[in-house]
Amino acid sequence: MVSKKMHVALNKQIGYEFSSAYLYLSMSAHFHAVNLPGFAHWMNEQYKEEMGHGMKFFSYIYERGGKVELEAIDKPPSSFKNPLDIFKQVLDHEKKVSGTINALYELALKESDYPSQVMLHWFIAEQVEEEKAASDIIEQLKMIGDAPAGLMMLDRQLAARS
C-alpha cells in the first residue's frame, strides 16, 4: 500500500496524463482542419501515448492496493497558430509533465516508497524521449521556415509515426 500522500499524488498524475492526451487530441483536430494530416497523425499518436501513461498510473494504484479517484480535466485550447508555435507549446507542456513526474519521484524518495521509485524510472526515461521528440521537430520547423514544400515533406515524415 502506498502512503496517503503518494496515493493522492498518483491520482493527480492520472489527471495530468489524461489532460495531456486531451490537449494533443485538440492539436490533432487543428491539424486536420488545416489539412496537415501527418501532423494530425503525430498528435493522435501522442494522444494515445498519454492515455496509455494515464492507464499505467491507474493500474499501478490498484496494484498497490489503492483506489483511483478521477478528477476533472480542463478544456484544452481549440485554436492554434502555426506548427512551430504548436510544437513549442508541446515542448513546454512536456517540460511541465516532466516536473510532475520528478516531483512524484522526490515524494517516493521521501516516503521510502521503493516500488514507486522503480515504476517512476520508466516515466523519467519516457519524458526525456518526449522532450527530445518535440525539440527535434521544433528544430526542423525552424529550418523549414515559410517553405511550403518543406512543411509538406515534414508532414509526410510525421505521418509515418507508429
Image (cartoon, helix red, strand yellow):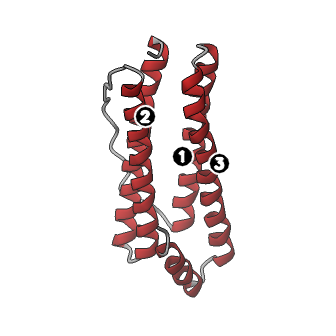
The total number of labels drawn is 3
Question: In terms of image quadrants, where is residue 153?
Answer: bottom right
Percent position (x, y) of residue 103? 59, 27
Look at label 3 and name its amino acid: Val
Residue at the (54%, 26%) spot, across then down? 116
Comparing 5 with 134, the one in front is: 5
Give neighbour class at mark 3: few <14, some 14-19, many 20+ (Cα, 10 Å): few
Closer to us: 51 or 100: 51
Disc 3 target residue: 128
Say if mark 2 contacts mark 1, CB within 8 Å: no
Residue sitting nearer the eye, 60 or 16: 60
Residue 33, percent from left and from top: 34, 71
For this view, does 21 lie left or right of residue 83? Answer: left
Residue 57: which disc?
A: 2
Q: Residue furthest bottom?
A: 149
Which sits earlier in the primary sequence, circle 2 or circle 1? 2
Q: Residue at x 51, y 72 (%)?
A: 158
Which of the numbered marks, if any, corresponds to residue 84? none
Q: x, y percentage for residue 75?
A: 32, 44
Residue at image coords 32%, 29%: 71
Question: Could you tell which of marks 2 and 3 lies nearer the N-terminus?
Answer: 2
Q: CA distance from mark 2 to mark 3?
A: 18 Å
Callout in the foreground (2, 1): 2
Q: What residue is pinned by disc 1?
A: 93
Is disc 1 surrounded by few (<14), some (14 to 19) or many (20+) residues within 10 Å? some
Query: Label 1's element?
Result: helix
Q: CA distance from mark 3 to mark 1?
A: 13 Å
Q: Earlier in the sequence, mark 3 or mark 1?
A: 1
Question: Label 2 neighbourhood size at 10 Å, few (<14), some (14-19), many (20+)?
Answer: many
**Residue type highlighted by circle 2:** Phe
Residue 36: horizontal and vertical position, in percent?
42, 76
